[in-house]
Image (spheres, rainbow, N blue to C red):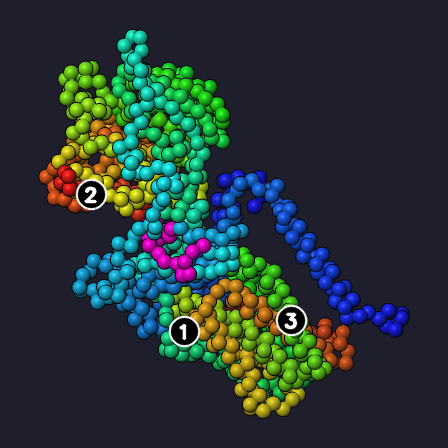
Amino acid sequence: MPADAGKRGRDVSANVETSRPIEPHAVETGPVLASRRALLVGGLVAASGAAVVASRAQSQATQDLTVGHDMSGGAVDPYLADDSGMAHGNMTMVGRVDHSRNGFDPTAMLTDWETGQTEVLTDGRTLRTFEVDAIDMEIEVAPGVFFPAWTFNGRVPGPALRAKEGERLRIIFRNLGSHPHSMHFHGIHSARMDGITGAGLIGPGEEFVYEFDARPFGCHLYHCHALPLKRHMHKGMYGLFVVDPDPARHPEHAAVAASRVLGSPENAEWQELAMVMNGFDTNFDGENEVYAVNTVGQVYMNEPIRIDKSRPVRIYLMNATEFDPINSFHLHGNFFDYYDTGTQLTPTLRTVDVIMQCQAQRGILEFSFADHEDGLYMFHAHQAEFTELGWMAFFDVQESGA
Amino acid sequence: MTDQSQPRRSPMTRLLLVLVPLAAMLGAFVWIASLDPLRGFNNGAPPVEALTVERTILDRSGISLRVRAGGSEAMVVAQVAVDDAYWTFTQEPAGPIARGDAVWLRIPYPWVLGEAHNVNLLSNTGATFGHEIGVAVSTPRAAWGQLRFQAVIGAIVGLLPVALGLMFYPAMKGVSRSGMNFLLALTVGLLAFLLIDTISEALELSTEAAAIFQGSAMVWLAALASFLLLMALGRWRGNPEGIALAFYIALGIGLHNFGEGLAIGGAFAAGSAGLGTFLVLGFALHNVTEGIGIAAPMLRARPTLWTFAALILLAGGPAILGMWAGSLAYAPQWSALALAVGAGAILQVMVEVTAYLLRQNADRQAALMSPAVLGGFLGGTAFMYATAALIKI
Ligand SMILES: [Cu+2]
């Protein structure tokens, strides 16, 4: 490969190197020869009138049907015992991700809200200050699969920033990475604070301070808005930006609002979880190889999320999946209320089990397992492809204190 | 200058004269290694990775792939996805795969008969290596029944047509000088077709092999080496002619048929077992010419019946051996190598038959340009081309 090819060059050349030997196997037969040998190979498959081996092919057929079939056939299936190793339970990644090496643990991320430093301004308002650094970092997105990420504060997704409606926000952003980056917040702010070129997009080694008021309340996001946008986004530069409603401003739904204010007694009732649906294109071909919630494929399959069934669950869910226009969330054995964008205090959808989110769409899910029996309840993307490439997970529902 | 004029050197001196440049060479290598001259080019880019699937086996335990690593460094298969689903797998032997090494990946995937499957291998750098299984069918086991069945097929496409061709021998016996020239030229013509066919197939196979085998260079060098070796062997006791030349032709055709058998056996191993009667017939017709070619140089000799049997075995038997070898241990690089050796053998036979043809005629120039020779050569290639086209799908 050329000496000046960078990270991208690696993957391209890897593919070029290998796709040639591998792809020509149009038919799986190993050698597919274009010359007279080809008729053997192709002809074998095609020639149904193959008198010579008709009986053999037949015996293969009976044998293969058992192989191809679902293993749930039970005792009726004479091959069940033999094929126990082929049950669909084998649909899983091999190995475990080393969270300590990554420097972040997706289970800890669920409840790890970044609330920054607060001080009271002269006018009585609260000034909340966050510090965020852009850092280049290689992360393990599936067991043994490493991805050269660009991160906010060394984690993907970036820190889940949480503030309260009406506060003054100050975000000190330092670019310690190798490329220009920014923080573009979904919220209401001035053009100067937009995080695009000329408004907070800074080069490596530079610093910028974003300042705006926390509004509207809801479940938002922030992401890098440097160009090319696709690459900066999918390399990991996004995170949740949650603004809790001020109960005083919403007297008609004060109780609901209070339950959303982090740290309030009403909020303590809830089990709140931060989830960012994302994907990783590990070979940079414009398609994701790994899908996940909070970055690591299948992590909540391997480490189910403990749920105390006596307390309701609230999920702040965001779709940061690049390359696929839509992602989805499906809960097994239960239904939930959904607050699209989280900017309402009454549900936008009631009693649903699947919601879909476009890129950058987000919302709040509320549900309860109070009347359920204990057990593992699955949740996953209802695009089967995403599910099978890593985006599936379990809630481990148990009695309180269990 | 004679040996005597050179000063006599003691064994010690002579040893030193070898050791000194050896030591210098060693020192130079150590120096180059310590210098790391490529360090200046190191831009932090990850190593180039390459992975080649050499064999695919589908059975009741799932999918097995034999993959060979060919990257700049040892590489790790971190995950395996089949049809866009991550799947468990085991690797034998486990661990990073060194450059040039091959391992078996066992994937307990419930594949579906007659359908296509896509296997995607993810390395630890996230690079992917796709392998398509076009039509999934169970890979036959190399059981005794299977081997016997392959022997029958091998005999039909290898032994039978050669024997049929040799049966023309009595009829050919009484031909005139120009008729003889025609037959020899026909032999060269059919060999010319086989040469081009064999080389192009070897080259194509070599592109499917891991880069470490250096596909086309291997093919050309192996062909050249086998050509030179067989030429030297053949000329050991003068120019081969008569029965000896017939044996060389049989050997060249036999090596070609071995390569052919390898590919058919590989197809069997890969699960595409089901040879149509029509195809077998096409092959037989195609290969009958080989028998005629073998008979041509023996027309002046008195071969025994045993000679014919030996010639048939030598020319056609390798097809059976090739099928067995191909079904038991198929890999594109070995098939390419076998075909390349066959190509070298075919070229040697072409040279020898042409030389024999020239020696048979007083006026070589005139004989070479005679209608009989040109017609025979063109007829040979055309017949091979036409029958090949007939059996092509
Ligand atoms: Cu960026």
Q: Is residue B386 above or below residue B44?
A: below
Q: Which residue is mark 3?
A: B227
Is residue B141 shown left or right of residue A110?
right
Image coordinates for residue B324, horizontal then vertical, percent = 45, 74
Q: Quadrant of the C terminus of chain B?
A: bottom left
Please name the amino acid that badge 2 sits on: Asp
Q: Which residue is mark 2?
A: A396
Label 3 residue SS:
helix
Please name the amino acid that badge 1 sits on: Thr
Subunit under mark 1: B
Q: Quadrant of the N terminus of chain B?
A: bottom right
Subunit under mark 2: A
Mark 2 residue crowding within 10 angstroms, few (<14) / some (14–19) / many (20+) = some
Mark 3 residue crowding within 10 angstroms, few (<14) / some (14–19) / many (20+) = many
State the extent of the magenta-drawn residues as a range.
B79-96
Visible residue check, residue B182 = no
Q: Is residue B89 magenta?
A: yes
Q: Are the residues flagged by discs 1 and 3 in contact, CB closer than 8 Å? A: no
Eye-nearest disc, 2 or 1: 2
Q: Is residue B52 magenta?
A: no
**Alpha carbon distance from label 2 to label 1:** 61 Å
Label 1 residue SS:
helix
Q: Is residue B369 above or below residue A281?
A: below
Q: Is residue B76 above or below residue B192?
A: above
Would the CB of label 2 be found within 8 Å of ligand 1?
no
Q: Which mark is residue A306?
A: none
Q: Are marks 2 and 1 on the same chain?
A: no
